[in-house]
Image (cartoon, helix red, strand yellow):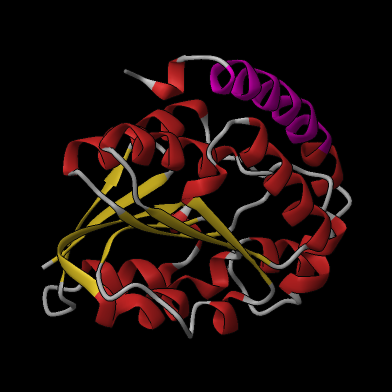
Amino acid sequence: MNTLMTPPLSLLLAQMFADADVTEASLRQQIETFSSEELDALKGGPGNYRELYARMKDMHLAVSRDTGVLLYILVRSTGARSIIEFGTSFGISTLHLAAALRDNGGGHLISTEFEPSKVRRARENVIAANLADLVEIREGDALESLARDLPETIDLVLLDGAKRLFPRVLSLLEAHLRAGALIVADNADWNPDYLAKVRSPTGGYFSVPFASDVELSMKL
């Protein structure tokens, strides 16, 4: 069985990706009007990322179709049962991860998103895909929501929220990562500090850039 390629999820994702294509085109136009501070915040700099992402609350900011399939494959192939996602948005990546958990026989995905309107939409999408029993979406700042009530062992992490927070979010999770746990960071090249952390020979990870926009790391 492949939940990813079966209705209702396959139909829902097709529509969500089509919608994401539209908002991405709109975002590219908006970026041309961004101040230097806003551009810096978008790419992981010290600007006010909260204000920036609130401004982009109607944008999907989704993983690519290929990255979605990669997430599904990684979860399935490793038999992952416990997943953390930083950056839910409307839930495209969430649905790929949860579909893989369903096909693995079950599990628990904790995702976090600070924009309330996106949390509502993501929860609706998870319900529409019949995956709500596998997914917990925590609303609020990930530095707070992921600082408590974590599973004893984490098999896979997706980092796809504010790029500036990647190192801090990973630090919150490190004590729970099992040996061999995978960390997928979307657009990680926007945060040199994160790349330095996971690529350091003494950092406790084995890491490689994957495709054009992903850093794939393994906890040693």
Taking depth in this image into account, of 127 and 217 the one nearest to the observer is 127
Which residue: 28% across, 38% down? 105
Q: Is residue 56 magenta?
A: no
Which quadrant of the view contains residue 127? Answer: top right
Q: Nearer the viewer, residue 215 or 138?
A: 138
Q: Is residue 202 visible?
A: yes
Q: Residue at x 26, y 68 (%)?
A: 198
Over which residues does the magenta segment extend? 8-26
Q: Is residue 172 left or right of residue 174?
A: right
Q: Is residue 144 left or right of residue 214?
A: right
In screen coordinates, is 184 left or right of 42? Answer: left
- At horizontal 31% and vertical 72% (from top left) the residue drawn is 196
Where is 127 relative to 15, above or below? Answer: below
Q: Position of residue 183 (x, y in %)?
A: 31, 58
Image location (x, y in percent) of residue 87: 58, 58
Residue 71 at least partly seen: no
With respect to residue 20, does 205 lie above or below? below
Q: Is residue 10 magenta?
A: yes
- Could you tell me what secondary structure mostly forms the magenta stretch? helix
Q: Is residue 191 above or below residue 30?
A: below
Residue 219: x, y in percent? 17, 66
> In the picture, residue 73 is in which quadrant?
top left
In the rendered structure, the answer to whether residue 57 lies left or right of residue 203 reads right
